[in-house]
Image (cartoon, rainbow, N blue to C red):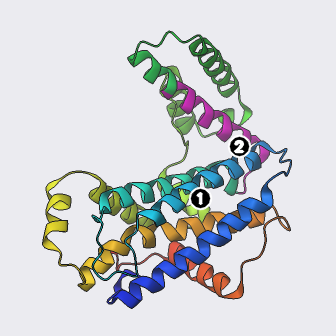
Amino acid sequence: MLEAINTWGDYRAKLREFDAVLEHGKAASTALVGLTLTAPHIRYGEQIFVKLLAHSTGLRRLAPDASQQHPRELWDLPSMSAVARCVVEAHDAFEYIAGHPVADSERSFRIRLWELHDATRRLKTLACIGSIDPAVNDIRADAARLLLALEAHPYLNSQPAVQQAELRLRLRRNDPPDFHLSRRQRCEMSGVDADWHKAVTLQLSQHVLTLPFSVHQLLQVQTGTPEALRLMALPLVFALPFLVRVIHRLELLLPGRVPKPPSRTARTMAAWRDLAAQGTKGLA
């Protein structure tokens, strides 16, 4: 997709695609307002979706103005890349908690593990700052409750000996993972090309970090060249397939509740879903 961006017109076209999908995502979110979502994974999924929409909206606002061939504001690729990484991470959390079609036992295990990972991280952070907030005791109690539930969980007991031992060791060490599956395993369950997912994440991280490559690149690229236009579009192009996938998955989770996209937007979304599934070697 990036290779197709050679002119300002190409860049504007990609912005229009992003805008169309984002507007449909907002319409989907609005349609869910006031609904009573009883299933924990769907409730969490809707909340993660709102977070992802916020990231996507922020990313769009950071994008250089397509009406100006020489943007007046400072072009902030690192910030755009950081927010795009947030979109990827929200997608991954959505899939793990709500998107993957798994049995109820595994679903409840995933949610408890995810919640324990969160509580453990919060306790470590609060300990580092020496917090004396009474709420710390509540978090500690929640973590203890979740740990007991996980150690006795039927799904954990059903896992192969090696994987079960590894998870139990991490639980005993007070280091629960956020996901019990590897990135490649999660991508396979999501129908996402794992190598493409890794390449996207690495490229975005490369621009986020303050390293020689990211410091030199913006100074060396000339405004208006195809290379500059592709860099401007890179965070948007990398984030868009993940936004599309979560909207589509939400439609499957809540059939009849999420409005159908206009035909042109539907075709755009299908193309970006295919990209995530098939991957591409033209990411440079």
Tell me which residue sits at (70%, 45%) in the image: 44
Q: Is residue 54 above or below residue 268?
A: above
Magenta-colored stretch includes residue 115: yes
- Residue 203 tag number: none
Do callouts 1 and 2 mark residues in contact (Cβ within 8 Å)?
no
Q: Position of residue 128 (x, y in %)?
A: 39, 18
Q: Residue at x 37, y 71 (%)?
A: 64
Residue found at x 81% / y 61%: 254
Q: Is residue 17 above or below residue 113?
A: below
Q: Dot 2 corresponds to which residue? A: 106
Q: Amino acid at mark 1?
A: Leu
Q: Nearer the viewer, residue 162 or 194?
A: 194
Can residue 173 be seen?
A: no
Q: Quadrant of the N terminus?
A: bottom left
Q: Residues within 10 Å of mark 1 (few under 14, many from 20)?
A: many
Measured as percent of width and height from the top left, residue 249 is found at 69, 64
Numbered disc 1: secondary structure: helix
* Separation of residues labelled 1 and 2 (CA atoms): 27 Å
Q: Secondary structure at mark 2?
A: helix
Q: Which residues are magenta?
A: 101-121
User: Which residue is pictured at 39% across the width and 74% down the height?
Assistant: 65
Q: Nearer the viewer, residue 109 or 58?
A: 58
Residue projecting furthest to the front: 72
Residue closer to the observer: 68 or 247: 68
Which of discs 1 and 2 lies nearer the camera? The answer is 1
Q: Which mark is residue 53?
A: 1
Residue 27, quarter of the rendered image: bottom right
Question: Which corner quadrant of the image does residue 106 belong to?
Answer: top right
